[in-house]
Image: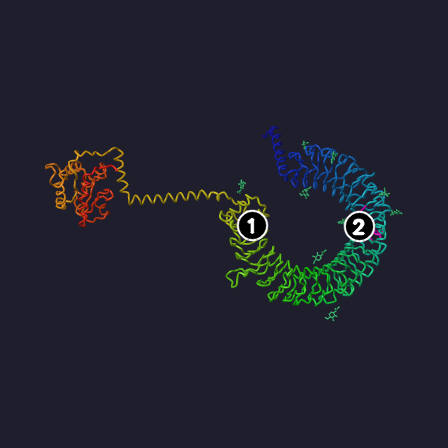
Amino acid sequence: MSRPLPYHIYFFSGLLTCWISCTSSANKCTGRHEARDCSHLKLTQIPDELPTKITVWNLTHNQLRRLPAANFSRYSQLTILDGDFNFISKLEPGLCQSLPWWEILNLQHNEISQLSDKTFIFCMNLTELHLMSNTIQKNQNDPFKNLKDLIKLDLSHNGLSFSKLGNQLQLENLQELLLSNNKIFSLTPEALDFLGNFSLKRIELSSNQIKEFSPGGFHALGKLFGLSLNKAQLSPRLTEKLCLELSNTSIENLSLSSNQLDTINPPTFDGLKQTNLPTLDLSRNSLRVMGKDSFARLPHLEYLSLEYNNIEHLSSRSFYGPSSLRHLNLRRSFTRQSISLTSLPKIHDFSFQWLKRLEYLNMEDNNFPGIKRNTFTGLGRLQINLSNSFSSLRTFTNETFLSLASSPLLLLNLPKNKISKIQSGAFSWLGHLEVLDLGLNEIGQELTGQEWGGQDNIVEIYLSYNKYPELSTNSFTSVPSLQRRMLRRVALRNVDSSPSPFHPLPNLVILDLSNNNIPNKNDELKGLEKLEILDLQHNNSARLWKHANPGAPVLFPKGLSRLHILNLESNGFDEIPVEAFKDLRELSIDFGINNLYILPLSVFDNQVSRKSSLQKNLKTSVEKTVFGLPFRNPSYDMRFNPFDCTCESIAWFVNWINSTHTNISELSNHYRCNTPPQYHGSPVLLFDVSPCKDSAPFELLFMINTNILLIFIFIVLLIHFEGWRISFYWNVSVHRVLGFKETDKAEQFEYAAYKIHAYKDRDWVWKHFSPMEEEDHTLRFCLEERDFEAGVLELEAIVHSIRRSRKIIFVGTQNLWKDPLCKRFKVHHAVQQAIEQNLDSIISIFLEEIPDYKLNHALCLRRGMFKSHCINWPVQKERGNAFHHKKVALGSRNSVH
Ligand SMILES: *[C@@H]1O[C@H](CO)[C@@H](O)[C@H](O)[C@H]1NC(C)=O
Ligand SMILES: *[C@@H]1O[C@H](CO)[C@@H](O)[C@H](O)[C@H]1NC(C)=O
Ligand SMILES: *[C@@H]1O[C@H](CO)[C@@H](O)[C@H](O)[C@H]1NC(C)=O
Ligand SMILES: *[C@@H]1O[C@H](CO)[C@@H](O)[C@H](O)[C@H]1NC(C)=O
Ligand SMILES: *[C@@H]1O[C@H](CO)[C@@H](O)[C@H](O)[C@H]1NC(C)=O
Ligand SMILES: *[C@@H]1O[C@H](CO)[C@@H](O)[C@H](O)[C@H]1NC(C)=O
Ligand SMILES: *[C@@H]1O[C@H](CO)[C@@H](O)[C@H](O)[C@H]1NC(C)=O
Ligand SMILES: *[C@@H]1O[C@H](CO)[C@@H](O)[C@H](O)[C@H]1NC(C)=O
Ligand SMILES: *[C@@H]1O[C@H](CO)[C@@H](O)[C@H](O)[C@H]1NC(C)=O
């Protein structure tokens, strides 16, 4: 038994899905300020959570079916709305009322099939309307009537069968009308009437299969400037008709590319004789025959393109007429399929004689057999591109360029022509030449210097990608004006001839010697003081700087004081000498793809504000010491290095980026950690620097710990060696503090001193102390034998006597600690007495030399306990007196110190 869920659950779940889908899609819109990009979000409804002040809104590639005016009313500031690639089939007139500032509407690739009179009635401020790739087929009304400001109207790729877009004059500001790829078959006089006499920059009618130009088709367009009719299947006859129709316009740019114009004759362009047409594009027409005087009616022509055609030959009158021509494009204009040599394209002598004003002649990618004596005769000051132009011209002789002798040729491009030999004097006719490009040929001869000569203005000779040209000392003696010399990948030989082949080139600014496998750069760069750019990549130069090599390091950039770009990529460098770039301040160096791992500390210190590259090396760290200075300005490119993401290697770098907010390109993609394993492959920026910051407190803790440990060890040692002293004085102090004050009443003491001595020493004691008693009658020692009361227990008597003696005298001999009574009992009591009464109360007399440790060992006594009243029994006579003086001590008070 299942019961339907209550309504409110449906309601809330519906609300929830709506809320999720609405917010999530709108939240995915990107962009800042007044622009929002909501493309590719599968939107079916207009989001209404965006800021109301947006002006540019991109809604392309969604699933919108309508643009409801109400939904746009909150975005009234909108000026650009891009709704390409949706399913919109209808536009509401109210939309323009909601958007008063609207200027550009893109609705390409939608499903609009109908435009009514009302569709754009309120869109007065619209300037661009893009309706390409919809399905608009017919139009009987005046939908664009109110678009007074419209500049560009794109209706291409619709199904329009004729171009009539209105019944009355309108679109007075239109400049571009795009109607290509429609189904327009004929242009009737009424078709373009609605455009009136307004000036129109361009009408695009390409890819329409126009069969007919009715008389007066362009009649209304007094000021038409550009017309494109590419891919319109125009035959020569139809072209002729078109030109007639254009005769009363002010056409300036006519493009007839990719038609079927296989022949042109003087009548073809006859209709244009009253115009001032400067630009004509006839490319890709399979043009085979170019009759005499075909362009004779176009004296104002300046730019003519004939590229990608099939012209069989040029005669001396082919270009008769357009004497203003400045730019002639003959790239791949001639037959290429040559069955025999006779069917190769022919350029007859004097073909270009009329083009006195030509500035640029492009003859790339052709198949000419050669250059004849008068091929180029008559040309003026120009540039000629003859790249890949010859099929069988292998050698430049002293006559090849004879026809250019009187033309001030400035630039000559001759690459990809399989040239293998240059005879001496080949370019001697070209005295004005500035740039000569001979790259990508097969020149393999020894360059003696005879090849050039006569080119006083030459600036650049490009010789890169040839086959083994051999240099000698004089190779360039005749061209001292040279500033750019390109010798890339030519497997150079003899560069090390002395003096160097480059020594006659004091003006050299750029020198490209890359890809040559020439490591020796000791002398050859000497004297090139103006050199600014030096390319040495791919030259296997690592050994020049490897300090283990004999003669290394060779500091080849030294002295090139103007150098500011040095390319050392892919040379296998793993060492850089500290001095390498010492005097070169403004240098930017490309060290990419080498094996650098460690850099000398100060190697970049001199460099200021230039961008250098260290990409694809073996750097694992970015050290402050090396990069601290240069990183302040434009940074080093260090992409693709195997960074070690640890505090020591990378923390400074990560902190530096974060604190300076420097914009390093591709930081998140190409700066990645290699080690340690947990960071492998992740961007350097994600390295967590927080543990590194804690290392400072750790250091402090470490220091404190060490100190505590040291103090502890000190205390242990102190206790071990001086512990007795501490405990002894501790006891003394305690007694004093607790009030065991001295009770110094002479009456209390029966004896001046109690003597502790071994039984065996009693004779010595008797002998030395009784005389003292006799001398001074107040003095009375406690002598056991004499003074102990009979009947009293000996131990009791000892304690009693010690109590009643002011002082205690030890008589220290070896015998003392052999006597058990003394050793344990008497000494203990004496020390107790000393602690309780006073430190002064013990006097010790050592009759023998007894070391302290023995004393301690045997009696737990130390000399230090007795303060100063310690007498070593005089070994010498004179010290006997001292002893007698010391007896004074016996009478002294037991003072508290
Ligand atoms: C909208 O985005 C598409 C790509 O999604 C882009 O091609 C188009 O130029 C953008 N339109 C505008 C007006 O920026
Ligand atoms: C926007 O359109 C949706 C459906 O298309 C509608 O539910 C909503 O009310 C509209 N918003 C406004 C503000 O008109
Ligand atoms: C068109 O723009 C102008 C300012 O350029 C403005 O004054 C006018 O109101 C706008 N037109 C419409 C129909 O909103
Ligand atoms: C177009 O304007 C020119 C002058 O600018 C005038 O001579 C010509 O008659 C006008 N043509 C039409 C169809 O109005
Ligand atoms: C061009 O204008 C002239 C007179 O201005 C007129 O005789 C001629 O018929 C016009 N040509 C065409 C094709 O409209
Ligand atoms: C002629 O028109 C074409 C487009 O149809 C344009 O690309 C070209 O730049 C124009 N040339 C000149 C000289 O205006
Ligand atoms: C070209 O050089 C040859 C000798 O190599 C010489 O006989 C001939 O006269 C030169 N031609 C010209 C035009 O200087
Ligand atoms: C001219 O020749 C050079 C080769 O030297 C080539 O790169 C360039 O594209 C050619 N064409 C033009 C129009 O400059
Ligand atoms: C970057 O600096 C900001 C403060 O400027 C700080 O909040 C943030 O945590 C730092 N990020 C890293 C990765 O250090």
139 or 123: which is nearer to us?
Answer: 123
Q: Is residue 676 left or right of residue 142?
A: left
Indicate the quadrant where residue 382 lies.
bottom right
Q: Residue at x 28, y 45 (%)?
A: 721
Q: Is residue 846 magenta?
A: no
The residue lying furthest to the left in this view is 790
Residue 533 x %, y %: 62, 57
Residue bearing the label numbered 2:
254
Taking the image as shown, residue 366 lies to the left or right of residue 634, namely right
Q: Are marks 1 and 2 in contact (CB under 8 Å)?
A: no
Q: Which residues are magenta?
A: 224-240
The residue beneath circle 1 is 630
Tell whether position 234 is magenta.
yes
Instruction: Identify the secondary structure beneath mark 2.
Output: strand
The first of marks 1 and 2 along the sequence is: 2
Mark 1 and mark 2: Cα distance apart in space: 55 Å
User: How would you rate the neighbour count of disc 2 (Cα within 10 Å): few for under 14, some for 14-19, many for 20 or more?
Assistant: many
Residue nearest the observer in this picture, 22 or 679: 679
Determine whether 220 is above or below 297 in the image.
Answer: above
